[in-house]
Image (spheres, rainbow, N blue to C red):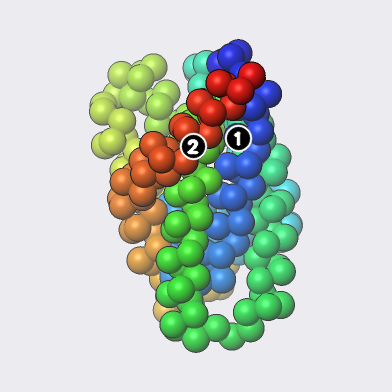
Amino acid sequence: MKRENLGRRICMSLFGVIICAISVGIFKIAALGVDPFQSFMAGLDAMVPIKFGTLYVITNAVLLLFALAFDRHYIGIATFINLFLLGYITQFTYAFLQTVIVDPSMATRILCLVIGVVIICFGSAFYMTADLGVSTYDAVALIICNTWKKGKFQYVRIITDVVCVILGCVLFVLSGGALSQIPTIAGIGTIITAFFMGPLIEVFHVHVARPFLNRQKSGS
């Protein structure tokens, strides 16, 4: 764990998780696909009759046990911030936006998707720059490739993402969802978040998050 400027890093992690959670709520309003792990969560949410926030905590607690069992050094303060906050903030954001954006047109949904992508990249840059642990889902691929030596990270991550999307779609259909509705949880937004967010995250990392951390350090 990074001990230098720990308080500031925690604040950055908290800010990043909150922004990412809000973005997931916006993605859900866009209904054009969410990121791979959230695709799985959407399918699970359709299947299991409990609130999304609570379901998110339970699911990530299971993944946390996996990480603690096999390589706990990926787990940090930010891991627990993500575990306990992201689901509930997403649940609140989605519920609120449903009262504001009622029956959105395709143009509105596309706009929400674009806003969601920008916001999640912005939040991710702060979360990653803080460097206080990864999400439990990220830890799975890292353990498989770095601890178990079962392949390169980019390929392992593609496999875990594909598994999440497939499971999410299967659970969604088994819960009674129509095949025509699958693109709302696994669509263009899923492809964008899985393969094309990196460059924008890097822009925010270099020009916003890293300068923010360095500026705080110089002022301490």
In-image side of 155 versus 107 (left or right): left
> Sequence order check: which comes first, mark 1 or mark 2?
1
Residue at 57%, 21% in the rendered image: 217
User: With 67 as the anchor, is 84 left or right in this view?
Assistant: right
Q: Residues within 10 Å of mark 1 (few under 14, many from 20)?
A: many
Q: Which residue is mark 2?
A: 209
- Give the CA separation, mark 1 to mark 2: 8 Å
* Residue type (three-letter) at the residue carrying disc 2: Ala
What is the three-letter code of the residue carrying label 1?
Met
The reply to whether residue 166 is visible in this rendering is: no
Give how far across and how far down residue 216 sits, in percent. Answer: 59, 27
Tell me which residue sits at (69%, 53%) in the image.
Answer: 89
- Do we see residue 28 in this rendering? yes
**Residue that appears at 59% across and 50% down:** 19
- Is label 1 in contact with label 2 (beta carbons under 8 Å)? yes
In front of the other: 80 or 159: 80
Where is residue 159? Give x, y as percent.
32, 42
Q: Position of residue 162 (x, y in %)?
A: 35, 49
**Label 1 sits on residue:** 12
